[in-house]
Amino acid sequence: MIQPEKLTYKSQEALQKAFSLAQERDHQQIDVVHLMAALVSQKDSLVVSILKKLDVSVAELESQLNGELSAPSASSICPMS
């Protein structure tokens, strides 16, 4: 189990933001997309610096991640009964 107190402050912020993103959208779990969206939203973070050095459009990535988070999940399209 992850012990949040042992994480860096920025990592704790990212986990909290990922949790908030999932909660705002009534998602039952935090997924990779939630965490990546949270990391990309930290404007002065190491993640954003690395992405920029790799010539990744951070704004476009952030837009794509938000679109992915807003898309209906497979379970909401075809609920299991």
Image: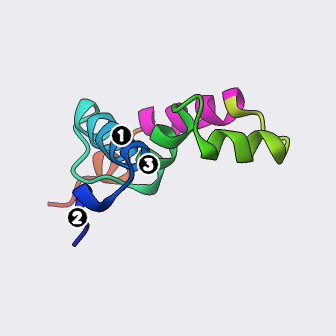
Magenta span has 15? no
Residue at the spot of label 3: 35
Residue at the spot of label 2: 3
Task: Identify residue type, mark 1.
Answer: Glu
Q: Secondary structure at mark 2?
A: loop
Q: Secondary structure at mark 1?
A: helix
Coloring applied to the structure: rainbow
* Label disc, if present, on residue 40 of the rendered structure: none
Q: Position of residue 26 (x, y in %)?
A: 22, 37
Q: Within 10 angstroms of label 3, few (less than 14), some, or many (20 or more) residues?
A: many
Q: Position of residue 54 (x, y in %)?
A: 83, 48
- Image quarter hosting the N terminus: bottom left
Residue at 38%, 55% in the rendered image: 31
Residue at 33%, 35% in the rendered image: 21
- Image quarter hosting the C terminus: bottom left
Q: Which span of residues is magenta-colored? A: 59-71
Q: What is the quadrant of residue 7 in the picture?
A: bottom left
- The foreground one among 67 and 39 is 39
Q: What is the quadrant of residue 58 in the picture?
A: top right
Residue at the spot of label 1: 13
- The foreground one among 24 and 14 is 14
Q: What is the quadrant of residue 43 in the picture?
A: top right
Q: Nearer the viewer, mark 2 or mark 3?
A: 2
Determine the CA span between mark 2 and mark 3.
17 Å
Task: Identify residue type, mark 2.
Answer: Gln
Task: Identify residue type, mark 3.
Answer: Leu
